[in-house]
Image (tube, rainbow, N blue to C red):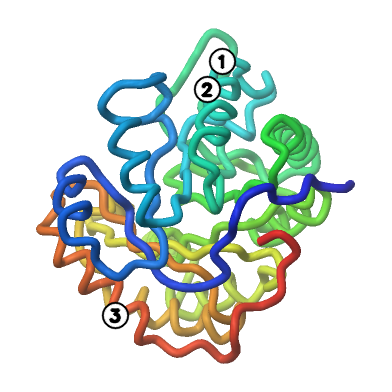
Amino acid sequence: MTSPAHRYPTVASGVGIGWRHPHYAALLDRQPALDFIEVHSENFFTPGGAALSVLLEGRKSYPVSLHGVGLSLGSAEGVDPWHLDHLARLVQTIEPVRVSDHASFARGTGLHANDLLPVPLSRTALDVMCDNVSQVQDRLQTRIAVENLSAYVQWRGNEMDEPAFLNALARRTGCLLLVDVNNVYVNALNAHLRGECADPLNEGRRWLDAVQPHHVAELHLAGHVHCGDIVIDDHGSRVCDAVWSLYAHALQIYGAVPTLIEWDTDLPELQVLLDEAEHARSVPASRPALTRQDA
């Protein structure tokens, strides 16, 4: 299956941060050295208004990556036309370096879960997601990146593991992959708590090793929280040492992939995010950014 060419300027390497409302003014005032900024697409769907005006101002200084949570790419009902229409308009306005969403579903018959729910790792679910990703790419006329989940429930009878599912999705649709390193570790920690994984770090390395490097277009780093019998990917703290270790491993496999510091809850001062970005920039890659067509 062929995929559309990327119509907009791209960022092949470097480090960015998630740009959230409390930091709008500080980022515009300070103009820190960042390779790109990333925003949640759905926050800017309203035509005109203050939010879009601020994003356009940020776009003057930084490449922008649009990261969504609402496409529901795994939904058997297909992609919501209203959502896709608004995303297409935003993409045309912003000309982002990347458009991304999650390998998840949120919509069912008469239901919107308002959450990122995992899909079965089956051939049927893969067919559904391939159809939806292809529809989105055809409409946007650009490749999108699809992110792995932190999943707190599991389906029975999976026919493949998550890396195999994502590799097949990228191969069949031409989409790219956004590897969230924190999600990989959170899932491994929860598997360990369930007695299914002896060593979460080794499990994380195994997962990263299984993803084909030429599909990977971006990495995410974030914090998580231990809540007794479960670990939650809350994006509310600094990146922990174990995730930094997995990030270093990822760079050895994938090369110098664009990396985002993601922080969404309990937001600190902007400088804390910039410090995390500087830490990410200091981690060496084994080689320059891999050649990825239109990545």
Tell me: 272 left or right of 257: left
Q: Nearer the viewer, residue 242 or 273?
A: 273
Q: Quadrant of the C terminus?
A: bottom right
Give the farthest residue toward the left: 269
- Cα separation, mark 2 vs mark 3, equals 35 Å
Tell me: 65 left or right of 294: left
Disc 2 + disc 1, Cβ < 8 Å: yes
Looking at the rendered image, the disc whose residue lies closer to the viewer, 2 or 3, is: 2
- Cα separation, mark 1 vs mark 3, equals 39 Å
Residue assigned mark 1: 82
Disc 2 + disc 3, Cβ < 8 Å: no
In the image, residue 252 above or below residue 164:
below
> Which amino acid is tagged 2?
His
- Cα separation, mark 2 vs mark 1, equals 6 Å
Spot occupied by residue 250 in the image (x, y as percentages of width and height): 53, 78
| Residue 220 visible (yes or no) | yes
Q: Quadrant of residue 225?
A: bottom left
- Mark 1 falls on what kind of element? helix
Spot occupied by residue 179 in the image (x, y as percentages of width and height): 53, 62
Spot occupied by residue 31 in the image (x, y as percentages of width and height): 23, 61
Spot occupied by residue 189 in the image (x, y as percentages of width and height): 38, 65
Looking at the rendered image, the disc whose residue lies closer to the viewer, 2 or 1, is: 2
Residue assigned mark 3: 279
- Mark 2 falls on what kind of element? helix
- Is disc 1 surrounded by few (<14), some (14 to 19) or many (20+) residues within 10 Å? few
Mark 1 / mark 3, whichever is N-terminal? 1
For the point 59% across and 56% down, the residue is 9
For the point 56% across and 38% down, the residue is 104
Tell me: 201 left or right of 146: left
> Which amino acid is tagged 3?
His
Residue assigned mark 2: 86
